[in-house]
Amino acid sequence: MKLGFSPAEEAFRAECAGWLQAQMAGPFADIRGIHSLCESIPRRKEWEQQLAAHRWSCIGWPAQWGGRDATLAEQVIFAEEYARAGAPNRVNHIGIELAGPTILTFGTEAQKAQYLPAIAAGTTIWCQGYSEPGAGSDLANVKTRAALDGDHWVVNGQKVWTSLAHYSDKIFVVTRSVEGSKGPKGITFLLMDLDQPGIEVRPISQMNGEAEFNETFFTDARCPADALLGAPGEGWKVAMGLLAFERGVSTLGQQMQFRNEFDVLVAAARANGKAADPVIRQRLAKAEIGLRLMRYGALRMLSQTDHSAIDGAALTYKIQWATWRRGLGELAMDVLGQAAEIAPGDDYAWPLLPNMYLSSRADTIYGGTNQIQRNLIAERGLGLPREPRGSQ
Amino acid sequence: MEFAFTDEQAMIADTVRGLFAEHATRARTRAAMAGSGADAGIDRALWAAFAGELGLAGICLPEACGGAGLGMVEFAQVAEAAGAHLAAIPLLGVAMVGRALAAGGSDAQRAQWLAPLAAGQILAAAARAEGLSDSAGRLTGTVQFVPHGGAADLLLAWSGDQGWLIDLQDAGVCVTPHVTMDQTRPLATITLTHAAATPLADGKAGISAALAAGWICLSAEALGGAQAALDQTVAYSRDRVQFGRAIGSFQAYKHRLADMMIEIEQARSAVYWAACAIDEGSDEAPLALHAAKSFCADTFHMCAGNMIQLHGGIGFTWDHDAHLYFKRARAIVSMLGDGQWHREQIARLMMGAAA
Ligand SMILES: Cc1cc2nc3c(=O)[nH]c(=O)nc-3n(C[C@H](O)[C@H](O)[C@H](O)COP(=O)(O)OP(=O)(O)OC[C@H]3O[C@@H](n4cnc5c(N)ncnc54)[C@H](O)[C@@H]3O)c2cc1C
């Protein structure tokens, strides 16, 4: 057990820190510190391509597909330096962190060659077509239909809450391809182009005034017959495998965003005097503890080579961070007081901390609600009986 | 960077788990709780096996004086296993005093005490005291809340940056053991009247080493105890049937168990982060220790409380072990600084003292 970094790892840190800081001070200074999902998208796409040009876009991937085969320690370091430099949110995080690793795991060699280089290059932005009006927590209840028509799949139905679909090039879609099938059987995992007449994307306004997610309608939308992961009718395994990547190395980058938010909050508390209030001090200290434990929990999870030992523990990660950030949002409002309730300008648009208060209410919903996480922990982590299902 | 146990560390954990599973049985723990005088709260046979056969009393003490020369990570593994079984042994005092001696003792103090401590031949206790007066090597005053004070041979008392070693055989020492809520670690009051005492050569280093060992010990015990409370409750929830179903199939019940696991996994990260930080001399060590002590104590207390609730009536009986965990947890919450105090220390590290 060892927490420190080796001299070679520290040299790697110096290299990536130097490059990132020069970029954020120079050519990309205009997008330094952007935290919202939908701001300055075209510039952030250019930034993705700049990262790719210097092979920093997905360092954990194999070199063959545009990565660096980076070790865990190197990925930790990069995530830290990325945040320290104030580099913006990754606009293609769904491509890099979900679609890419899923294709690496379940794709054929031809599919890897077809899809991965464009993700690494920052030229193809992906989004996730899982949820439907009737299938949220109960994802296996998807109704969007896929049928083979010669050398194409034809897709009809509706997805909802599709984040960033309005800026994306591709979507992975959980469909039902076997007529009359129910639950996890008969699911096919398709990879589709969004830019086609059969797909319509309609943004949905969110409670924080932004419109990051969408309704996505499929009307005889098409994709080639081989644009699927896993066998036809057996896509459930792929859909579930993808969710496991949400607990992967991407968590480290996300934590650095939390660190930035937390630092802004502490600075605000010091500036307005709340940092002297003993109750606020206790809560800030608790939040600091929670953030550190998230980091060391992630390192423990990622350091483990024997995955059976850690799988149960890894299940606790989602609810942990989501609940932590929601709590941080509440603490931020208590620190800022009524001042936080007035928008700085004429739009219904919020600065970092009040926006965190609002946006964090989604954290405990998407990617499996807190209730669903507790079910998973109890059933998979502790081996308790499964929830009874109603008849549908 | 690799935050996982080495093969050697995994072996140590297996060995100590095996030892406590065999010896620290319910029956023997209860016998130790019922002991009196110098045997109150101590299973002497377990201590003999632990210190004598396995040589574990000096696990984190220097090799030069008979210790194993290992660090806080290995010690935490031992304390975690001891906590899981509520082992009635004076691990806390021996580690605190041993580490204080190694870090801040004079040559004479080290020569006199370290080898017998590492061999488990003598027992030690440590406690903070206010208002001790030292006149020419003679201490007068009262040391309260001394864990296993009734059984100890050697006392480390400290106040601020000053620490003293007191041989409890001295004529100026009066030990009053108390009936203590947590009977697996009874407390004593020790009154000193011109008792012979020698100061630590480097009080600051000695006391900070003692506190670090103490906080790791309590955090790791709490982690082990919390996990045991969860495991035993999960086992019960599979057997006990109400409304025609195993109670563990009710969602309100499952979710409380899940909440326990969520906290326990964080507590595990906290213990080994702090232990590693000390072993590596990291700047993060103070923060990590305060985080570990406050977080793990709270986690254990929550889990032990849930253990009672989720067992129903049987959980409130003397015969069931739930109350042993609950009382151990409550004692740990208060020992060596409560959660509020530790969190305030973290606030100071983050933002300085409140204006
Ligand atoms: C900001 C945001 C972005 C999103 N982005 C995407 C995206 O990009 N792609 C995508 O596919 N989806 C996305 N989602 C959808 C998200 O995954 C779903 O909202 C989520 O899975 C919950 O489904 P639901 O909204 O249908 O709620 P429901 O499943 O209807 O849940 C309603 C309530 O019932 C509870 N509940 C449901 N089942 C149980 C149970 N068995 N036990 C106890 N309680 C239960 C839930 O916890 C919740 O409190 C996004 C959501 C949000 C908020």
Image (cartoon, grey):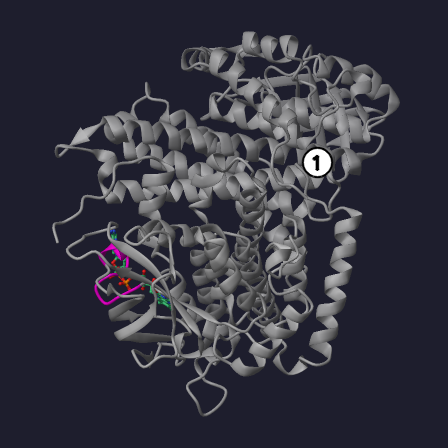
Tell whether position A328 is magenta: no
The x and y percentages for residue B187 are 55, 24
Q: Which residue is at a point 47% across and 65% down the rendered structure image? A: A94
Left or right side of B280 for A351: left
Most common SS among magenta residues: loop
Classify 10 Å Cα crowding around label 1: few (below 14), some (14-19), many (20 and above).
few
Label 1 resides on the chain identified as B
The x and y percentages for residue B355 are 65, 65
Residue furthest out toward the front: A150
User: Label 1: which residue?
Assistant: B131
Q: Which residues are magenta?
A: A131-141
**Considering only vertical position in the picture, is A387 above or below B33?**
below
The answer to whether residue B264 is visible is: no
**Considering only vertical position in the picture, is A370 above or below B82?**
below
State yes or no: Cβ of the residue under disc 1 lies below 8 Å from any atom of ligand 1. no
The answer to whether residue A326 is visible is: yes
Tell whether position A139 is magenta: yes
Secondary structure of the residue carrying numbered label 1: loop
Residue furthest out toward the bottom: A346
The residue nearer to you, when weighing B156 against B242, is B242
Total numbered labels placed on residues in the image: 1
